[in-house]
Amino acid sequence: MATTVIATEVGEPEIERLRRLAWIVFAALAAASVAAITALIALLPKDASASDQRRSLVVAVLAATAGSAISALHSATDRYGHGLELADGTKVPTHGRADRFGARLVPLFLMRPLMGSLMGLVVYAGLSGGYLIATSGNTKLSPAGVVFFAALAGLFAKTALERLKIVFGALLGDDGAKKALAGQD
């Protein structure tokens, strides 16, 4: 108990700064989510026949951006709920889970919607090229299907990129990546 009091007293200005920073991150991610979802709704065609490639591409990027922003918001608020980690590594409170909100994570949280946007482009290319689902060359993409796959890609962009890094490392001969891919890490 004394450790908590000392850590709180010594790091009080930093704790308050981290709390303010956390709320700024939450607001930015919530705003990105709402903006992407609002634009997505405005751009979704009223009927499937009105869909064109450019609109489908924008829809995919927006859906993935919204998915990734929501995922980042969930992660940031979850970590905040577990506590704070000060710049020197002090945990407030001193007990509990290790994954805490800290200033070092802010750039990652703020970049996650961009990672989602990029995954939206990849998903759109995969769908329109027939690589993600079997389609014939003249099949129009369902806007709902584009939103579904792109939003999933955004929600899991961080995980997908981490896995792709392992897969490509293994393909390029990285022994550590090969072990991780085989589940031996």
Image (tube, grey):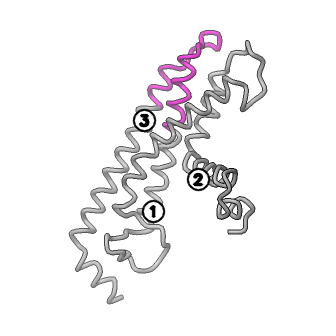
Tell me the kind of residue under disc 2.
Answer: Glu
Q: Residue at x 64, y 54 (%)?
A: 169
Q: CA distance from mark 2 to mark 3?
A: 26 Å
Q: Is residue 143 above or below residue 3?
A: above
Looking at the image, is mark 2 or mark 3 earlier in the sequence? 3
Instruction: Name the side, left or right, on which 10 lies relative to 173.
Output: left
Asked if residue 127 lies in the magenta stretch, the reply is no
Foreground residue, 5 or 59?
Answer: 59
How far across and down, in percent of the image, does residue 76 sit? Answer: 44, 56
Q: Mark 3 = which residue?
A: 34
How far across and down, in percent of the image, does residue 17 sit? Answer: 25, 62
Task: Bin the neighbour count of mark 3 within 10 Å (Cα to Cα): few under 14, some 14-19, many 20 and up.
Answer: some
Q: Which mark is residue 79?
A: 1
Task: Bin the neighbour count of mark 1 within 10 Å (Cα to Cα): few under 14, some 14-19, many 20 and up.
Answer: some
Foreground residue, 55 or 164?
Answer: 164
Looking at the image, is mark 3 or mark 1 earlier in the sequence? 3
Outermost residue on the bottom side: it is 2
How far across and down, in percent of the image, does residue 102 sit? Answer: 37, 64
Q: CA distance from mark 2 to mark 1?
A: 20 Å
Outermost residue on the left side: it is 13
Q: Is residue 89 above or below residue 21?
A: below
Q: Mark 2 = which residue?
A: 162
For label 2, the SS is helix
Look at the magenta stretch and give its main secondary structure: helix
Looking at the image, is mark 2 or mark 1 earlier in the sequence? 1
Asked if residue 62 lies in the magenta stretch, the reply is yes
Magenta residues (range): 37-66
The C terminus lies in quadrant:
bottom right
Task: Bin the neighbour count of mark 2 within 10 Å (Cα to Cα): few under 14, some 14-19, many 20 and up.
Answer: few
Foreground residue, 87 or 164?
Answer: 164
Q: CA distance from mark 3 to mark 1?
A: 21 Å
